[in-house]
């Protein structure tokens, strides 16, 4: 077992030999890394699921490579990773900003960026918490399970998937192999491994249609497709939740490892269970304690080194981290400002003329209403008429699209009333919003507050109050708004972290608690948010409430990501 800390690597042999501690020459400069170990090559990678930054460990120099802090990607919580000499470093699925994702990405080691691959074949639903496994062919990778839905949107609820896919890293082809739900209704994955020289899987999973869930080890064969339980479920169900499996080729045993943090402690208890192969009977467990010592970030990350001997593959491990924020739901209300036209884009998108909201039916065309929103978000910057046509009428003929565009512009000017003619300007084959002095927009006030050279805590609070709890026009569902929404979400998150640091410095624990609840409204899995809530409550002498919030987060994290949250309660309150 390999535990990765901020400034050391700790190897704990299953054989009972001495523990090996290797001090690194530099700390790992990532806030929220997942770790990927390729057993055959011995390469160890760390990838930050919030920023996309990647660091590579050099065992000879005992150093982590520097990371480019200017290159950021979208957030991919719960993404699955794998590495091979042929396929490179790959990422599958993930979750961020209320959405699950189904992209397959490859990390370019030279450019230091993630590229989304153009995959052919079958399409899997957006999801996080996928289990990856090297295939029977060197170019193949198996993907299993995960949590998500067809749309990827969290508001529709995530379900557990019980399918297996095969991805060819050479041809970039994805193929669905099987769906275990047809054989075991209510089935959910916990972990999956393959065995050397045998075309067979073993997966740890269970039937969640039973009460309590029937946790079991299943043998899966693909040719012909067959799944059957092996062993006795009552012997493993007490420790199977969150467990991982490896195969020890020397002793011919399956080894299960289950870890959990002691209550109100930073001690990680790891228990190992050895099962005969073929697995029939579980034997007595052996327990190992590992105490966290890193004060910069908590790590309880397990990489299985048993796989190194047989080249079973990449074991993905994750560490989550701490920091930040507070808001109220934005509602449609008469704006308090004196401008003839007021636009609200945070929360419910709404437009007010002289204090009265423009009803949807007045716009007559939803395209016109959304085109005006797009021009507002461009904040006076021009957009070519060809680009407008491509975004709003991509499938129409040129003549039809031009007519629709001109009609929408005319409709906007008419809907906005007396000042409408001045609002939309067309010049040099570009459209832009003009007459800014006659428009009050919450987005513009948000940017003004945060655009100053020196921003006070009060101004930060005002900006986050403007941003609210639900972000930029969440009910607007168009492709073009996604990147804009993500941009302002990241701005809000960075701003919340600054405010959280100020609250901590000033011992404003009420403010920190409120801020944390707002951050969790943005993303229920945000580590910064739960840290703020727990830290604030504990410092306000409410330890029971703090622990209750922490436990609720643990349960939600396990349900959504399918993994055990690794930061202890004790570390959060330090």
Image (spheres, rainbow, N blue to C red):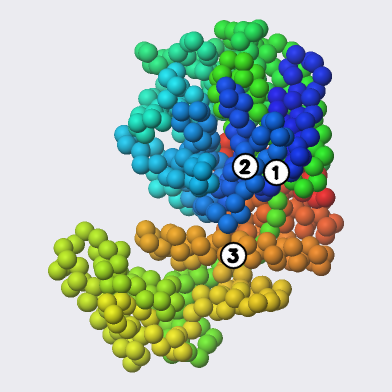
Residue in the foreground of this view, choosing between 284 and 313: 313
> Which badge, 3 or 1, comes first in the chain's sequence?
1
Residue 484 position in % (x across, y down): 45, 64
**Which one is in front in this view, the residue at disc 2 or the one at disc 3?**
2
- Picture quarter containing residue 370? bottom left
Crowdedness of circle 1 by 10 Å Cα count: few (<14), some, many (20+)? many
Say whether marks 2 and 1 touch (CB < 8 Å).
yes
**Which one is in front in this view, the residue at disc 3 or the one at disc 1?**
1
Q: What residue is pinned by disc 1?
A: 28
Q: What residue is pinned by disc 2?
A: 55
Q: Is residue 458 left or right of residue 190?
A: right
Q: Secondary structure at mark 3?
A: helix
User: Distance from label 2 to label 3 (Cα)?
Assistant: 26 Å
Q: Is residue 116 above or below residue 426?
A: above
- Picture quarter containing residue 369? bottom left
Q: Which residue is found at the position 60% from the left and 30% from the top? A: 43
Crowdedness of circle 2 by 10 Å Cα count: few (<14), some, many (20+)? many
Q: Is residue 271 left or right of residue 163?
A: right
Residue 322 position in % (x across, y down): 70, 51
> Which badge, 2 or 1, comes first in the chain's sequence?
1
Q: Which mark is residue 492?
A: 3
> Which badge, 2 or 3, comes first in the chain's sequence?
2
**Which quarter of the rendering shows the N terminus?**
top right
């Amino acid at each position: 077992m390999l535990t990765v800390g901020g400034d050391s690597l700790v190897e704990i042999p299953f054989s009972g030999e001495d523990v090996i501690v290797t001090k690194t020459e530099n700390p790992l400069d990532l806030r929220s890394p997942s770790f990927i170990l390729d057993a055959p090559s011995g390469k160890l990678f760390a990838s930050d699921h919030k920023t996309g930054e990647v660091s590579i460990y050099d065992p000879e120099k005992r150093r982590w490579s520097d990371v480019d802090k200017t290159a950021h990607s979208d957030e991919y919580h719960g993404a699955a990773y794998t590495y091979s000499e042929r396929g490179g470093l790959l990422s599958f699925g993930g979750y961020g900003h209320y959405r699950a994702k189904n992209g397959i990405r490859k990390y370019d080691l030279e450019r230091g960026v993630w590229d989304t691959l153009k995959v052919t074949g079958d399409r899997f639903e957006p999801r996080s918490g996928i289990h990856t496994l090297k295939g029977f062919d060197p170019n193949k990778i198996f993907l299993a399970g995960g949590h998500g839905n067809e749309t990827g949107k969290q508001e529709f609820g995530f379900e557990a998937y019980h399918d297996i896919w095969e991805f060819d890293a050479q041809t970039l082809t994805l193929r669905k192999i099987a769906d275990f739900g047809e054989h075991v209704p209510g089935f959910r994955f916990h972990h999956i491994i393959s065995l050397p020289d045998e075309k067979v899987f073993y997966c740890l999973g269970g039937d969640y249609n039973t009460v309590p869930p029937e946790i079991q080890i299943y043998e899966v064969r693909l040719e012909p497709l067959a799944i059957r339980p092996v062993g006795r479920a009552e012997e493993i169900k007490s420790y199977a939740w969150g467990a991982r499996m490896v195969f020890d080729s020397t002793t011919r045993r399956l080894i299960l490892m289950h870890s959990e943090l002691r209550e109100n402690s930073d001690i990680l208890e790891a228990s190992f269970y050895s099962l005969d192969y073929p697995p029939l009977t579980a034997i007595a467990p052996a327990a190992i304690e590992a105490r966290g010592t890193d004060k910069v970030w908590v790590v309880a990350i397990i990489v299985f080194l048993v796989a190194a001997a047989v080249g079973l593959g990449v074991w993905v491990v994750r560490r989550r981290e701490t920091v930040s924020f507070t808001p109220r739901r934005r509602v449609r209300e008469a704006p308090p400002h004196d401008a003839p036209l007021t636009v609200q884009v945070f929360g419910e998108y709404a437009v007010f003329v002289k204090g009265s909201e423009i009803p949807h039916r007045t716009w007559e065309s939803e395209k016109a209403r959304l085109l005006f929103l797009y021009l507002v978000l461009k904040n006076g910057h021009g957009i070519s008429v060809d680009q407008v046509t491509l975004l709003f009428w991509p499938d129409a003929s040129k003549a039809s699209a031009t007519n629709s565009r001109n009609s929408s512009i005319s409709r906007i000017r008419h809907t906005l009333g007396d000042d409408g003619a001045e609002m939309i300007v067309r010049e040099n084959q570009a459209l832009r919003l003009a007459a800014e002095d006659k428009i009050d927009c919450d987005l513009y006030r948000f940017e003004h507050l945060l655009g100053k050279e020196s921003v006070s805590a009060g101004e930060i609070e005002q900006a986050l109050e403007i941003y609210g709890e639900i972000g930029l026009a969440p009910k607007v569902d168009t492709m073009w708004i996604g990147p804009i929404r993500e941009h302002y979400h990241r701005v809000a998150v960075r701003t919340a972290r600054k405010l959280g640091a100020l609250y901590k410095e000033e011992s404003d624990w009420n403010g920190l608690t409120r801020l944390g609840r707002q951050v969790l409204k943005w993303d229920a899995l945000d580590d910064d948010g739960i840290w703020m809530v727990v830290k604030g409550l504990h410092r306000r002498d409410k330890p029971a409430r703090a622990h209750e919030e922490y436990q609720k987060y643990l349960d939600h994290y396990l349900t959504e990501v399918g993994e055990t949250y690794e930061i202890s309660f004790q570390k959060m309150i330090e």
